[in-house]
Structure formats: structure tokens, C-alpha cells
Amino acid sequence: MSELLASVGDGLVIAKRNLIKVRRVPETLVFVLISPIMFVLLFAYVFGSAIDIPGSSYREFLIGGIFAQTIVFGATFTGAGLAEDMQKGIINRFRSLPMSRVAVIAGRTASDVVYNAISLTIMSITGLLVGWRINNGVPRALAAFALLLLFAYAFSWVMALVGLLVPSVEVVNNASFIVIFPLTFIANTFVPSDGLPTPLRVFAEWNPVSAVTQATRELFGNIPPGTPEPDAWPLQHPILYTLVWVVLIIAVFAPLSVRRYRRATLR
Amino acid sequence: MPNVIEAAGLTKRYGEVTALDKLDLSVAEGTVLGLLGPNGAGKTTAVSILTTLIEPDSGTATVAGADLIRQPGEVRRRIGLSGQYAAVDEHLTGYENLDMIGRLYRMGRRPARERARELLARFDLVEAGDRPVKTYSGGMRRRLDLAGALVAAPPVLFLDEPTTGLDPRSRMDLWGIITELVAQGSTLLLTTQYLDEADQLADEILVIDHGRAIAQGTADEIKGMVGGERIEVTVADPSEAEKARSVLAPFATGRIESHDGRDTTLVVPITGGAPVLTQALRALDGDGIGVRDVMLRRPTLDDAFLALTGHGTDDEETNDE
């Protein structure tokens, strides 16, 4: 038990260090935060003019999808941060200290929750400016944000492993696109998934990003009354399905990342 | 005296390359072992294994009484490491770096803070202590890195090429600090490719090349393996070097080497000291060979390396250790 507490302490020390760095080099944050704003504007004004959602405005529909997409993209920040650490001498310091072997990664995923919270705040403001509204009360809205942050936290463990596997920060960005693009676009994020060709539709329906999006839309009250109940089970129980993925992702990727970290040497 | 570091048969291969080949080493309590070798000799691999950063393919070792393979956590608690790449976070201040290391040694909040301030003072970093490390000079980074290794006052220290790339003044500063540490009873394993550094700091020197130990002894013993004095003659006209070589041959007690790949400077091993030097110069003068520079000197560890390995310290291909 005391070892577990000490490990949590180690993780917090690392998280604090990561946040100091973000404060000292705010530029790292600025560019990553601008891209979601661009996505909102791009989809709201460019694609939005061509996509018709029955009974709703596209912008109401869009924001839930953008939220989900942004937190998945945001996980790249975790991978890049770890890849950068692994290229620096500091990693040998950490590995020669009697600290927890999971702390460097756990500290990174923890500090990135703060990053995702900032990112969601900026997204919400941008959304409100283009016409998105919270229609279901504050408690449900808070639940939506909590669910988004939880999924973001889980997904940053996926990118943590990517960050530990690849040789440099640049490769993280390229490699993450392979994972992120299908996950965020073959989903109900930007268009309703009903109209997709069958294989893609099935993928979209079982895609956890779709469930996160669906849950977010429900909790914010962005689904217009009269919209037919989705056919697929995950979309009928989006919160539960998302939580299952959160547990699953952490259970698989946390041990894999730690194993990789133990074996990694300074590159 | 008991051995604080004891390693037997350490072997590490990377694909076809054998980075370490059955290396044995031991370091007695309160002494300094200098691991000497050129780039790619396996020095960093040896340190990485002994500090638990990588696992050996085979071999055993104990460090400060803890078994390297079975008790890596115990080893980490008892060692400090300062590497050739200053292992400090450049976005953090010097103080924040040391405080973080203290917390990760699980010293507790207050002791970690106090220790950080204490070490900044000791390493002459008080003024720079609250500036981000990226504003530091190379010498300051190394001092901070060394301070990082000392946070928990570990009984065993590993310093991997502590002065590589430093200017002469910073190098002298670090030598002073290291000498002081040893005077206070630390046991130290130091790697270096600077022969004067091993000569200056180490009680015992282990010369390694291609992952293998090729000689071991005190600096004097190693020099002894190479024989007596040397005359170094630089001829004024490079085209006369070959002629000078044959004139000097009768005085040489071993092979005449030429310096740094060019033939203008000849290194002639001799016995007999100054009188032999005088005779040699007379002989050169008698043949009308102009001499630009001449020196009589005791063998350096560079000569030792040349004699032990058949190649100098700087003609090794630089591969990643």
C-alpha cells in the first residue's frame, strides 16, 4: 500500500515537472490548441453548408463530434512529450532512480488531463460562438465533460505507447495519424453514420469515438427530439460502452507502455 | 577492503556487435576505478549495466551489496549516476531539477528542498539556481548533473565521461569536485577517454577496447607496461623524416612511431635520458637534418594505449555505445 502511494507521489512529481515545462514554453500549447478552433470553423462554415441534418442545425450536431475528435488528437501531445523525454538524457536519470517504473508515463498522462481540460474549454467557447448550446442542464453537461476527459485520459495511454515505440517526435505525429484518422472520421463525428456503406457503418457503430460523440450529444442535449433511436447497441448505451473502452484501453496499454519503458534506453 | 562494485563476465551484444565481452571488474570501498578506452570501447555499456539501465546478456554483478539482476531497485537506491549527456531537464530551473530528484528518491518535501539548496551552494550554482537550465553553460550543466547524482548522498557513484566536451577551466573545476568527493569516502567508477583524467583521478585503471579488458593497474603500472622515456623530434623539413628515422634507429629501444599520422614528428623510445638525447641530436645535426622541435618525456597513457592496443585513442570509428 505504501509503495502504491509512493508511486502515485512519483507520478505527481513528474506531472508537476511536465506542467512547469508547458508554462515555460507556452508555444507548445498554442499551436496544438489552434487546430481544434480551425476544425470548428472549417466544418461549421465550409462543410456545414453542404451537410444537412434533419431536424437540427449542423453546428449543434457538429460540436459533439469535434469534442471527441479533439481529445483523440490531443493524445498525440502525450506521445510527443514522451518521445521527446526518451530522446533526452533526463530519461536515464529517471531510470537510474529508485522511483516507480510507471511514474514517468502515468505522470505524463496525468498532466495531459490538464491540457485536455484547457483544450475543451477553448472548444466550448468557440462552439458557443458559432451557435452550439447546452440544452440539458449543468449536471449533465459536467458529466459530458467528465466523460470526455476520462476517455481522453485512457486514449493518451495508447499514444504513450506509440511515443515510446517510435524513434522521434516527428514520427509520433505521423504514426498517430494512421490511428487517429480512421478512428475520428469513420464515425458519427461529422456525418450521421447511417448513410455509410455497410462495412464502414458497422465500424462506425462499434467505434468508441462514435460512442463518446453520441454520449456527448445526449448529455449536452444536442439530439433533436424525434430523432430515431440508433440501431446499434453501442450507440444505444454510449456512456456504458465508452466506460468499457476506458477500462479496456488502460488495462491493455498501461502494462504494454511500462514494459516498453523498462526496456527502452536512451536513443 | 571489501569490494563495493564486483562484476564478473558482463557481456552485452547488439546484433552482430559485441559491446561488452566477458568484462570483470571490481572497485574497493573508497577508491576510484577509471574505465579507460576510446569511443565505442564499451564504457557506457558497462556503466549502463551497472546502473540497471540495461540488462546484460550474461554475467553477474553486485553493487553496494545488492545483486544487479535480482535487486535492481536496491541498487538504484544506493547509487548516483552522472552521464555524458547531462541528465537534467533544461526547462526546469537548477533548483527544480534537484528538488524533483530528491522527491523521486522519496526524501520527502522538506528534506528534498533543503538538499537542493545545499547542493546548489556547494556547486557554486546559487545565483543560477532559479534560472531555467537552458540558460546554463556546458560546465554549469555538468555541475548540476553531478549535483543530481549526489542528492541522496549515495555510497557509490558512476560518472560516465564527466568532462567530455568541457573547456579546460570547467574540467579543472570538476576534477576538484571529484577529488573532494573521493576524499570524503565515496566509491567511484569513472569512465573517460582522456588519459590524463584517469591518471589524475583514478586509483586503479582498467583499459578496455572492443568491450574487453586489455590491461589493469595503477597509472604508474600501466605506464610501466610501455617502457621508459621517449624523445619526440619534429623535423623542419617533412621530406627528411625518413632519413631522420634511420639516423635515430640506433638509439631506439623499440619501434619508432610517428605522431598524429604525419611523419614530421617521430616518437623514439629510449633508455638513458638526457645524454642519449644529446647524442641523438648530434647525430641528426651531423647528417644535416634540421630540427624544429625536440622533447624528452615520460610515457603518457596515450603511449600506453598505443602500445596495448596497437592503435591510438583517436582512430577508432565512433559507433554508438
Image (tube, helix red, strand yellow):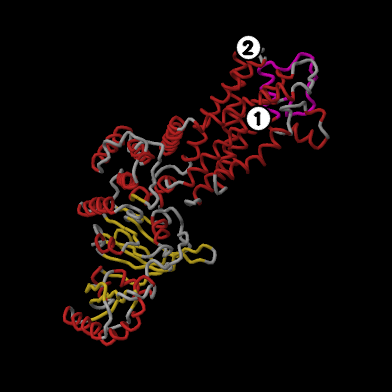
Mark 1 and mark 2 lie on one chain; the one further toward the N terminus is: 1
- Along the horizontal axis of the image, is B56 left or right of A184? left
Q: Residues within 10 Å of mark 1 (few under 14, many from 20)?
A: many
The one nearer the camera, B245 or A263, is: B245
Q: Quadrant of residue B269?
A: bottom left
Amino acid type of the residue that numbered disc 2 sits on in the rendered structure: Gly
Q: Quadrant of residue B307?
A: bottom left
User: How far apart are the alpha carbons under marks 1 and 2?
Assistant: 23 Å
Is B141 part of what is drawn in magenta? Answer: no
Q: Can residue B266 be seen in this view?
A: yes
The one nearer the camera, A229 or B256, is: B256
The residues colored magenta run A210-236
- Along the horizontal axis of the image, is B149 left or right of B1? right
The one nearer the camera, A210 or B131, is: B131
Q: Residues within 10 Å of mark 2 (few under 14, many from 20)?
A: few
Q: What chain does badge 2 belong to? A: A
x%, y% of residue B275?
A: 16, 81
Q: What chain does badge 1 belong to? A: A
x%, y% of residue B167?
A: 31, 52
Is A232 part of what is drawn in magenta? Answer: yes
Task: Name the residue carrying label 1.
Answer: A69
Check the picture and name the quadrant holding the N terminus of chain B.
Answer: bottom left
x%, y% of residue B266?
A: 31, 76
Q: Residue furthest left?
A: B275
The lab-note entry on whether marks 1 and 2 share a chain reads yes
Task: Name the residue carrying label 2.
Answer: A137
Compared to residue A57, the image places residue B13 above or below, namely: below
